[in-house]
Image: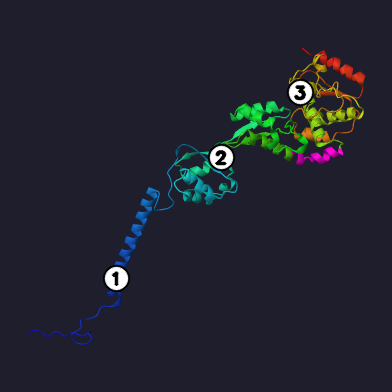
Amino acid sequence: MTAPTTTESTSGPAGRPPQRSGLRAARPVLVVAVLLVLLVGGAWVGAKVLGDSLGGLGGPEDYPGPGSGEVVVEVAPGDSAAAIGNTLADADVVASAEAFIDVASSDERALGIQPGFYAMKEQMSGEGALELLLDPASKVQTEVAIPEGLRVEEIAARLAKASDLPLRDFTRELENPQKLGLPDYAEGSAEGFLFPATYAFDPGANARDMLRAMVDRYRQAADDVGFEAGAAAAGYTPREALTVASLVQAEVAVRDFGKASRVVRNRLDQGMTLGFDSTINYALGSDDLTLLDEQLQVDSPYNTYVNAGLPPGPINSPGEAAMEAAINAPDGDWLYFVAAAPGSDKTRFTASYEEFLVFKDEFYAQVP
């Protein structure tokens, strides 16, 4: 006989099934939530990978680089990273302004980008574009070095050669220099006012732009040395002082600028003619080391052998050291000077005419 089965009821009211614990009841909901997280996360990772590979969904649109061809872009003074980025994007250097901005904003070197024109490539990465903008070799400029002591026609020839502009463009501007910004005491002539320096001109600069930049640089040098006030203190007008500067620039080496300036002052004070070969050469348009007697008689206001006082104006473009010497001549009684030998940069000074003649004979004895 089978014993009756005894059950302990855990149910509630009759007719309701037994209840499981709360933890076990929530497990299906938890599984569903985990699956949703995995699905969403997987979708995000997939979109990120796909976006990065396409240069779109995962960040700013960017070219992979390195780019090709060449395009010239301009960075204007004061341009921000955003402005530069827009310029690059407009020229198709980068795929988007943001591609450049993101790189530039995380690299402090970007603060050193200088205004100017740059040779870039089309379809570069933002990083590649930044590197080119930081490379000085990428700058597109016409560079020309103008040494001290050149005359206007020599300067014009150098500018024309460096820029590939016609020489006549410079000649035309120099013949009518009203728009070059010359000071009043230039008296309508650019001679002496095209300051010697190394210049870098942007693409598109014309002859007037270049010449005006040189005049502007002269004004800066004159301000730096207090030229106008210094000329007045030395008893010169600014034009006279610049003429003196051009004479010492032509006659002696830098170390002797001061002494030569004092010779000019002493000879003027004593009513003597200057007797400078450099002014004869200027009148003749030559650069002869030794001059013939008939050359010394040339009919010109620049002939300082026959005309007393300073010539009418500068005979070249002097540098800042010569300008300073013209207005700050050292004390001394020198009246004469002669090069120690042909081609030598050493000069012998004296207050004695007899000693001067000895120096002169020794010089000519060495002329080939």
Q: CA distance from mark 2 to mark 1?
A: 64 Å
Q: Residue at x 47, y 51 (%)?
A: 98
Work out which residue is located at the far bottom of the displayed protein and give it: 13
N-term-proximal mark, 2 vs 1? 1
**Residue at numbered disc 2:** 117
Highlighted magenta segment, given as a residue range: 221-233
Residue 279 location, x and y as percent? 79, 23
What's the mark number on residue 29?
1
Amino acid type at circle 2 is Phe
Tell me if residue 130 comes above or below residue 15 in the rendering. Answer: above
Element marked by disc 1: helix
Mark 2 vs mark 3, CA separation in Å:
39 Å
Q: Give the Cα distance between marks 1 and 3.
A: 103 Å
Tell me if residue 229 is in the magenta stretch. yes
77 is within the stretch colored magenta: no
The answer, for residue 183, to whether it is visible in the render is yes
Q: Which residue is mark 3?
A: 282
Q: Nearer the viewer, mark 2 or mark 3?
A: 3
Per the picture, the main secondary structure of the magenta-coloured stretch is helix
Which mark lies nearer to you, 1 or 3?
Answer: 3
Q: Which circle's residue, 1 or 3, is located before the other in the chain?
A: 1
